[in-house]
Image (cartoon, rainbow, N blue to C red):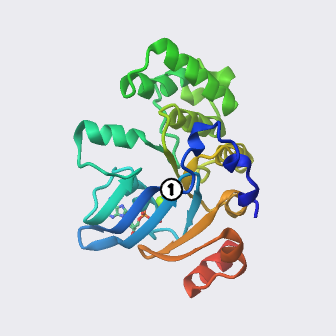
Amino acid sequence: AAARNRPRYETTSNPIVAGVGEPLVVVEGVEKYFGDFQALKDINLTVTKGEVVVVIGPSGSGKSTLCRTINRLETINAGEIRIDGKKLPEEGKALAALRADVGMVFQSFNLFAHKTILQNVTLGPIKVRGQSKADAEKAAMVLLERVGVEKQANKMPAQLSGGQQQRVAIARALAMKPKVMLFDEPTSALDPEMINEVLDVMIQLASEGMTMIVVTHEMGFARKAADRVVFMADGEIVEEATPEEFFSAPKSDRAKDFLSKLL
Ligand code: ADP
Ligand code: MG
């Protein structure tokens, strides 16, 4: 309900929403092994443009591995992943370009410690997208303002709180103009009082029409922002449903068990 009330479908002037409803991330029959251990088992998932998918599940169920295969930080052993109709290339320039279409925010902030906040955000656009320094800095300041850390632009990452650093990480990913944003437990390493400032930025992003895949244990976020909840266990997608359906009437025993432990 909340998700469907979002204004994003009406804001056609926003380029992010062009093609809403078309498949953007397609994961087909993906299998992933680490040695003999199978971390992903026949994963099939289609995320459409403008959709927000929340992935939940117990620790070790393969959520991070799935994110990392979508960004090609991990190779896959079988199946196929397509981003906006293009198969993920093995390596080289084509991979760098396609990877730039997929913004990623991790649990740990991963900012470049020896660069300023502004440099953290401009580096990718200058190196990968070939933007001029002036253009990249102008765009970066707009993004830093959007996530509420524009006053910190010339500071070093260590001078910022965890919540501020994570918002910079979001701005840095957005600076590449990604088609989809992946978030892997972006608030798990934060002090409780900082969680909402990061979730608020993500909710804002969702309302603007960004396609998002979000691994999180923040069920409030899932209820508010998700179009769909995907529940994983033991390397499989066990259940997919709207947040309303999933939280009020989970179908599988594994989902019921998982939800009972969260409360
Ligand atoms: P989640 O994010 O749901 O907690 P992960 O995707 O991190 O789960 O891990 C899924 C399973 O794959 C776990 O059993 C984990 O130990 C295993 N795994 C993840 N990465 C590696 C790796 N690089 N080498 C070996 N095993 C791994
Ligand atoms: Mg994980």
Q: Establish whether ligand 1 lies closer than 8 Å to the Cβ of label 1.
A: no
Q: Quadrant of residue 140?
A: top right
- Residue beneath the point at 50% across and 12% down: 134
- Residue beneath the point at 28% across and 56% down: 75
Task: Reply above or below: 207 against 215.
Answer: above
Q: Nearer the viewer, residue 32 or 181?
A: 181
Q: How many marks?
A: 1
Residue 228 is situated, as x and y percent measured from the top left of the image, at 61, 66
Answer few, some or many: residues within 10 Å of disc 1's Cα (few below 14, many 20 plus, some between 14 and 19). some
Q: Is residue 61 visible?
A: yes
Residue 183 is situated, as x and y percent measured from the top left of the image, at 53, 51
Quarter of the C terminus within the rendering = bottom right
Task: Reply above or below: 257 against 164.
Answer: below
Residue 180 is situated, as x and y percent measured from the top left of the image, at 50, 47
Q: Quadrant of residue 130?
A: top left
Q: Would residue 75 be found to the left or right of residue 218 on screen?
A: left
Q: Disc 1 on helix, strand or loop?
A: loop
Residue found farthest to the bottom = 253
Task: Reply above or below: 14 against 80.
Answer: above
Q: Would residue 247 be found to the left or right of residue 72 on screen?
A: right
- Residue beneath the point at 41% across and 50% down: 84
Q: Nearer the viewer, residue 200 or 228?
A: 228
Q: Nearer the viewer, residue 237 or 120?
A: 237
Residue 137 is situated, as x and y percent measured from the top left of the image, at 54, 17
Residue type (three-letter) at the residue carrying disc 1: Glu
Kindly identify which residue carries mark 1.
Answer: 22
Q: Is residue 62 visible?
A: no
Q: Quadrant of residue 162?
A: top right
- Residue beneath the point at 31% across and 62% down: 80
Task: Reply above or below: 23 against 58.
Answer: above
Quarter of the N terminus within the rendering = bottom right
